[in-house]
Structures are given as C-alpha cells and as structure tokens.
Amino acid sequence: MGKSRITSIIALVLVLFSPVHAEQSSIMLGTTTALTGPAKDLGLAMVKGMRAHFNEVNLAGGLYGRNIELIALDDGYHPASSRVQMQKLIDEYGVLAVVGNVGTPTAKVTVPLANANNVPLIGAFTGAGLLRQQPPDRYIVNYRASYEEETAAIINAILEQGIHAEQIAFFTQHDSYGDAGYQGAIKALRENGYAEGERLTHARYPRNTLDIEEALVEIITAKNTPRAVIIVGTYGPAARFIRQANMVLPDTLFFNISFVGADALARELKGCCDNVYISQVVPPLDNELSATVAYRRSLTLKDSNGTEDYVSFEGYLVARIVTAAIRQAGPDVNRDSFIDAIETFHELDIGIGEKIKFGKDDHQGSHHVWLTRIHGKRVVAADWQTLN
C-alpha cells in the first residue's frame, strides 16, 4: 500500500472520529436564557425540564440514531446579551432550532433574529403578543397560553368573587413584559363592561431589581383600597412586594401570572401568606396525567437533576413538542421541514389531558389556563370558581 494511500486513510479516520464530526452527528438545539442574575431560577428550570426529556430520548437511542444536544447560553435576562447569544447559536453552532428562551424583553430582539435567519424559535417562556402575530410568523411557535389569556382568566375569577373592578390594582415590571400582562388585563376588564381600567392604580418597578418601595406606597395608599392586586413580575420583587403589602392589606388577594415562577415565589415567601395565587399554562403537578408521570420519572434518570417545579415542567412539555416534530420531519430534518412538521399537528397528544393544535394559521398549541395557590410553602391546585 502506497504511502499517500495510507496517509489518506489516516486522514479519513481522523475526520470520522474527530469532535467536530461527533458534534455534527447530534441534533443541535440551542437556548439563550437567564442562567445568572435575578431571573436565573426561571432559565435554569426551563433548561432542566428540556434536558430531562432530551436525556430520556437519548437514553432510549435518540432520534434516527442521533442524540439531541441542547446548548444553553446565558443572557442574564438582558436583551443586549440575548441578541449576542442568539446570533452565536445561529452562526457558530448552526442549531436546528432555538427552544425555551425566557422573557419578553429578550424576545423583542430574538424574534426578529429568528425571522431574519429563518431559524425556528420554539416554546419561548413568555406569553407576550409579539410572538403571536396574526397570521403567525412562520418560524415562531408557542406552546403556552398568552398573557392576555392568563390575565383574562384572573380578571374573570376576581369579578366572579364579587370584587368590583374599582378594587383592583396592578403591580408590574416596568418593561414590555409588564406592559403585555397589564394590557391583557385592561382588555379583559373592557370585555367585562368596565372601560375605565387605565384609571386603576398601576404601580411599576424596574426590571432586574428589588426596588419595589415606591410602587408599594402607591398601592397601599390608593384611594380605593385594593381587594385584589394583579402582579406581572418575577419571583424576587413579587415576593418582596407581597410580604410587605400583606402586612398592610391582609385581606387582599394577590394574583400572579405564570412567568413569576410559582415554586421560586413560594420559596421566597417562606410560608408568609395564604392569599397568593398563580395562573399556570401547565396542569398542576399533583395529578397522574401521563405527561406528569413521565416528567417525574425523567427527573430520576441518569444525568437528570432536580425536583419537580412548574417552570421545568413547561420546559419538559416544550421538549416533547420538539422531539415530536423531529420524528415527524424524518432523518433529514432541517429548519423548514421542522416547521412544516409542527404545522401538521392538528391534534397532538403530549399527555396533559387535552390535545394541542397547530396549523399554518395557528402557531400556539395550548390556550388552557390552570390556577394554583400557595399553601404554606407549597404550590397546590386551586379552583377558578371558589379560589381554593
């Protein structure tokens, strides 16, 4: 055998077994999310849930003989960092899709990048309208109900309890996330016949801070003492606000939307209050639905880490949708065939007790909103009609 032929064979072997080739043999997915900073519990939980499902798929042989690899980059819940990390996932890692990003302010920069680069952005942890255009952006796909749907459910429950619209106040993050939840609630009030929603007390706090004191004073000194406060924030400032407001307003009900991170909020509150509610876009965890059972089991597998929580359960469900789409697209899956596959899911069963539906004109799978409350230090199921 000639020297040149031996050299060629060696070169081929090195290529086949090099780290680059190993990486290319995996199905590469990415997320840019908060792994550090005041919203880190949300990003870490989403990554935990997604990896729990991808891990169980990989342990069962992967998809078409290929493992799924999730690259998680830290943006600290800062839009500027999210832009950099999103571009890195697209240009340097060449991901099939970006999945489970956290936040509305960050989505304001990642959504345009996804659309401009024809890269699927799937299952972001936000209910903001900018990801829910009509007709939908081809490359933006949502699992969860919108903030508008969450706040509408909250407003309806408050009014059904006999609380008057004038007795509602708002505590929101001063950015696009806070505005999205607030506007959803105002729309729901209007649909219930109350046109003066924007005159209700609305106090704000700055993103990525615990500076809630000015907002707190504004709410506890409101002309109409609030019997219900709708909170559109993250767990740290929300908990600080609730603890202090509850001392002055012990009979007031505090309602949070899902992005707050129910389990992180319960940890921060340390059992102080039993009048705290959280709307959810996933079923309560104290049930035996097939997705819940599988999720619990996935957390016990090798390389999985952590206990149950609502945010990681959402990440797990998003990952189930992603793997279903890859299976449907086939072994030669690419970004466009991946989206085409999702649009064929007119009745996809991911184990939550109801089918989720997608289509060319509908890129939001679920519209269901559940209710939970904090009881002691635990998050438990609650009923919209009775709030218990």
Image: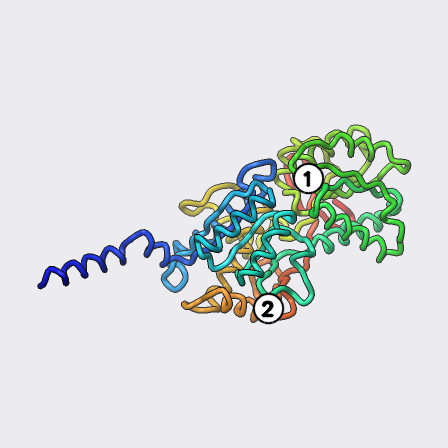
Crowd band around label 1 with a 10 angstrom C-alpha radius: few (<14), some (14–19), many (20+): many
Q: Nearer the viewer, residue 137 or 47?
A: 137
Q: Quadrant of the N terminus?
A: bottom left
Q: Nearer the viewer, residue 103 or 55?
A: 103
x, y (%) of residue 278? 70, 45
x, y (%) of residue 62? 40, 59
Q: Describe the element under mark 1 as helix, strand or loop.
A: strand
Determine which quarter of the picture holds residue 28: bottom left
Residue drawn at (80%, 32%) of the image: 250
Q: Describe the element under mark 2 as helix, strand or loop.
A: loop
Residue drawn at (51%, 60%) of the image: 322
Q: Nearer the viewer, residue 10 or 173?
A: 10
Going by the image, does 25 lie left or right of 283? left
Examine the rendering and report whether any part of residue 345 can be seen: yes
Examine the rendering and report whether any part of residue 277 can be seen: no
Residue drawn at (70%, 37%) of the image: 206
Q: Is residue 175 above or below residue 56?
A: above
| Type of the residue with mark 2 | Glu
Q: CA distance from mark 2 to mark 1?
A: 33 Å
Q: Is residue 275 above or below residue 182?
A: above
Crowd band around label 2 with a 10 angstrom C-alpha radius: few (<14), some (14–19), many (20+): few
The circle drawn on residue 347 is 2
Q: Is residue 129 above or below residue 208?
A: below
Going by the image, does 374 lie left or right of 97? right
* Furthest-left residue in this view: 1
Front: mark 2 or 1: 2
Q: Is residue 358 above or below residue 171?
A: below
Q: Nearer the viewer, residue 117 or 176?
A: 117
Residue drawn at (50%, 58%) of the image: 97
| Type of the residue with mark 1 | Ile
x, y (%) of residue 375? 68, 38
The circle drawn on residue 374 is 1
